[in-house]
Image: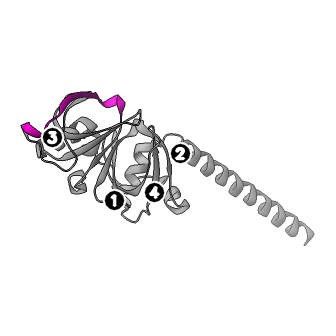
Amino acid sequence: MRWDRFFDDLEDQLSSEWEAERVALDTEAERLRLSRVTLRERLTSLAADGAASEASVELCDGTVLRGTVRAVGGDWVAFSLAAARGGALVPLHAIAWLGMPEADLLRSARPLATRSTLSDRITFGFVVRDLGRRRSGVEVHLAGGRGLTGTVDRAGVDHLDLALHDAGAPRRADAITAHRIVPFASIAWVRVDDDRVLG
């Protein structure tokens, strides 16, 4: 009888050790998976979720925006702004930090159910060219803290041409005060009056 209890104890101990080893392997596999997750993937998860709460994002110019993640492209994210009408187009390189409720933070780290290769190819330049095509009024905020208002005339691979005019005014030859070539690397964010154009 004592031998039966002895073997049962050994069996329970072995079973516990196997379970502990399985948990350790699962934990290590999860750590490895998380080590490969990009910021873009986490933002994509928030945009795809649709249930994400409002987030705060500090940008390289010191601006803190509050809003919900609306869309994510290859190298940018669009936010619907909470306190103001319109939206913000933010290059990923301009993000200093993101703040959100812990539930959203954890949800953003989960594996994506489906991955869109089309959104991978929609770059910041592509979206800026679309803003120019639509003749949307924009306010381009530079990394140094300055803002330029106007209309995007054209966009290249790494820069845009901006016709400067008063905010809210249509682009007309007599309203243009100057033109600027703005490298994408110097842009902290772009405010768009109509956030429907951002997705």
Cα separation, mark 2 vs mark 4, equals 21 Å
Q: Which residue is mark 2?
A: 34
**Tag 1 secondary structure:** loop
- Label 3 vs label 2, nearer the camera: 3
Task: Looking at the image, tell me whether mark 2 or mark 1 is earlier in sequence order.
Answer: 2
Residue lying furthest bottom:
1
Q: Which residue is mark 1?
A: 84
User: Does dot 2 land on a helix, a strand or a loop?
Assistant: helix
Query: Which part of the image, by quadrant, shows the C terminus?
Result: bottom left
Foreground tag (3 vs 1): 1
Residue 7 pos. (x, y %):
83, 63
Nearest the camera: 102 or 62? 62
Q: Which labelled disc corresponds to residue 132?
A: 3
Callout in the foreground (4, 3): 3
Rendered location of residue 82, percent (x, y):
38, 61
Density class for disc 4 (Cα within 10 Å; few <14, some 14-19, many ≥20) is many
Apparent side of residue 168 relative to residue 78 in the rendered image (left or right): left
Asked if labels 1 and 3 touch by Cβ distance under 8 angstroms, the answer is no
- Disc 4 versus disc 1: nearer the observer: 1
Residue at the disc numbered 4: 55
Q: Which residues are magenta?
A: 174-187
